Amino acid sequence: MSDAAILNRVREYYGHTLREHGPTPRGVDWSSAESQERRFRELSRLWDGDTAATIVDYGCGYGALARYLRTIGHTGEYTGYDVSDPMIATAREQAAGLADCRFTSVRAELPRAEYAVASGIFNVKMDTPATQWHEYMLDTMSDLASLGSRGFAFNALTAYSDADRQRPDLYYADPLACFESCRRTFSRFIALLHDYPLYEFTILVRFQAD
Ligand SMILES: C[S@@+](CC[C@H](N)C(=O)[O-])C[C@H]1O[C@@H](n2cnc3c(N)ncnc32)[C@H](O)[C@@H]1O
């Protein structure tokens, strides 16, 4: 299956979750606001408290990260991108009034920022074969890398989750393989965060050491 075909299915899937649950964590398939925010906290370690850092949010959903950032005093320009048009229309409504926040569903319109982050875009593979999803993940990581001049970060479900609780429609990535692939392809300055209580991990890639 091509990346374009995968994206069409992703678009359909999240169009459905949004129609069912509206602009809420469940509307982007998260179980709670707490877990959604915990992911944001882990990803934010990428810019290490630099509140002026410019951010691209890849797979922004209804824009919850924009609100989170403004709530904690982050002032840097934020651009949210999502493959789903209804998601972007909702994000624009939800973020109305937030300073320096923009949204687009057109990849070509996405500017580069200092940092690019993606929360939750690698989890739901549906019935895509795992090998194809892995290739799609690598392609998408390269796209993320092209969008952050200083670095990028993403999360994924961990292959270290209990085998009997794993679902066939979700993709459980090997954190060590992801680390190694990022090290080989992008940079040697990488953090693998596997120390928070969700069945997943976060990878931070910096292009230069701080
Ligand atoms: C699990 S939701 C998370 C939304 C948001 N990041 C959050 O944490 O609230 C994933 C979102 O990413 C979007 N998405 C998934 N893969 C994408 C891709 N390759 N390019 C753009 N958007 C994508 C989906 O449409 C969906 O809105």
Image (cartoon, rainbow, N blue to C red):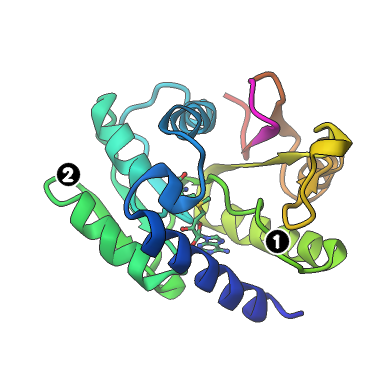
Tell me if 150 is positioned left or right of 60 in this view.
Answer: right
Q: Is residue 136 magenta?
A: no
Residue 5 image position (x, y, % from top left) = 65, 80
Q: CA distance from mark 1 to mark 2?
A: 32 Å
Label disc, if present, on residue 104 of the rendered structure? none
Q: Residue at x 65, y 53 (%)?
A: 122
Q: Is residue 202 magenta?
A: yes
Q: Mark 1 — residue?
A: 125
Tell me if 150 is positioned left or right of 109 in this view.
Answer: right
For the residue labelled by badge 2, is the local secondary structure a helix, a strand or a loop?
loop
Residue 175 in view here: yes
Range of residues picked out in magenta: 197-203
Labelled pair 1, 2 in contact (Cβ < 8 Å): no
The answer to whether the residue bearing label 1 lies less than 8 angstroms from the nearest atom of ligand 1 is: no
Residue 172 image position (x, y, % from top left) = 78, 45
Q: In the figure, 142 relative to 35: above or below?
A: below
Q: Residue at x 56, y 42 (%)?
A: 151
Q: In the figure, 48 relative to 100: above or below?
A: above
**As rendered, which of 51 and 31 lies closer to the eye?**
31
Q: In the figure, 44 relative to 14: above or below?
A: above
Q: Residue at x 70, y 61 (%)?
A: 125
Q: Mark 2 — residue?
A: 98
Quadrant for the N terminus, please.
bottom right
**As rendered, which of 77 and 101 lies closer to the eye?**
101
For the residue labelled by badge 1, is the local secondary structure a helix, a strand or a loop?
loop
Within the image, what quadrant is residue 178 found in?
Answer: top right
Residue 2 image position (x, y, % from top left) = 72, 80
